[in-house]
Image (spheres, rainbow, N blue to C red):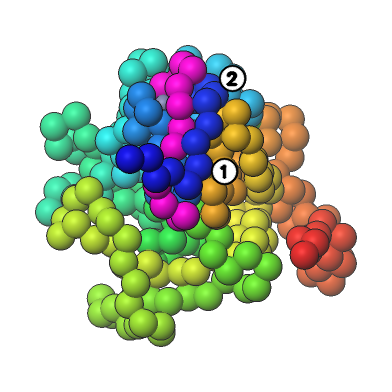
Amino acid sequence: MENKVLRSKGYCSTCDRDVEFSSRHNWLRDHFICSNCGSIPRERALMQVIEIYFPNWRKAVIHESSPGPRGASMRLAKECPHYIPSQYFHDRSPGSLVGNMRCENLETLTFADESVDLHVTQDVIEHVFQPDKVFKEISRTLKPGGMHIFTVPLVNKSTPSRIRAKKHKGQIIHLAPESYHGNPVGDGRSLVTIDWGFDIVNYIFYSCGLFTHLIYIDDLDRGIRAEFIEVLVTIKPAKGRANVMNMLDQHWSWSDKLALLRNFIVRPQR
Ligand SMILES: [Zn+2]
């Protein structure tokens, strides 16, 4: 008995072959799966964006925080010899290996300055307590010309991002009802600390001075259709192209900077 909401034939970017995509549920984000690899739309969108923005990914040093057991994580692990997966284990020292997984805290990475070509995170940034530190660390460790390519559910869309939980003296303070997503480690669940909106790109800029592209793909032929399907690409300028923040710091007053930024910040059309 067929009871499918959506069904489509096409190319899957995470298993690199022609497949069928189908969903039995209206919530495509978690249920519109590839018949071959079981990937979900945001994983295929992320891989598609990596192919477009970083076509030489097989030769790159790639760090992925909290990889998944399928989809883009599997493809990167299989085809990139310099792929470094990491998880944060509270009882292990950062930088050490736990099996084939490196222990890393995104807020205090142990990677050397300018040592990573591509940082990848998939639905991780809505769970961190100090996102400004995360973006600073990603910027510090990226090589010039490197990128952070990631997904994060932008649930607030064009309304401002909202902090749901913060830490004070080691204690978690909830500012909104507790909400959890699944987590492959620990007790199997991960607290949502921020409901992000499109203004995340401004937040990243103010944190580390890097610009971010926000990419929306809706392509049934590639099984990319779902709610909150945006992929973000934060780019560290190649050498010779000054970091915008450094350049502004040297030459511009704060009022000049704000005037300039107003021109850069484009509100999404609704
Ligand atoms: Zn697939």
Give the labeled residue for mark 1. Answer: 225
Residue at (22% x, 48% y) in the render:
184
Q: Quadrant of ligand 1?
A: top left
Q: Which residue position holds label 2?
A: 55
Check disc 1 and report its element: helix, strand or loop: loop
Q: Are marks 1 and 2 in contact (CB under 8 Å)?
A: no
**What whole-number distance in Å separates the C-alpha atoms at marks 1 and 2?**
23 Å
Which of the two residues, 247 or 155, is positioned nearer the viewer here?
155
Residue 177 seen in render: yes
Quarter of the figure with the N terminus: top left
Mark 2 or mark 1, which is nearer the start of the sequence?
A: 2
Task: Give the residue displayed 32% in from the left and 60% down from the top.
Answer: 181
The amino acid type found where label 1 is placed reads: Arg
User: 72 above or below 103?
Assistant: above
Instruction: Report the span colored magenta.
Output: 15-27
Q: Nearer the viewer, residue 142 or 269?
A: 269
* Of 101 and 20, the residue lying toward us: 20
The crowd level at tag 1 (other Cα within 10 Å; few <14, some 14-19, many 20+) is many
Q: Residue at x 55, y 54 (%)?
A: 228
Left or right, 190 with reference to 216: left
Along the line of sight, which residue is nearer the eye, 244 or 186?
186
Residue 214 image position (x, y, % from top left)? 66, 48
Q: Residue furthest front?
A: 1
Q: Quick check: 184 above or below 174?
A: above
**Horizontal and vertical percent for residue 103?**
23, 43
Cβ of disc 1 within 8 Å of ligand 1?
no
Q: Is residue 162 magenta?
A: no
Q: Count neighbours of disc 2 (C-alpha within 10 A) and say few if under 14, some if 14 to 19, many if 20 or more.
A: few
| x and y percentages locating residue 112 in the rendered image | 40, 36
* Residue 36 to residue 33: above or below: above
Horizontal relation, residue 63 to residue 169: left or right: right
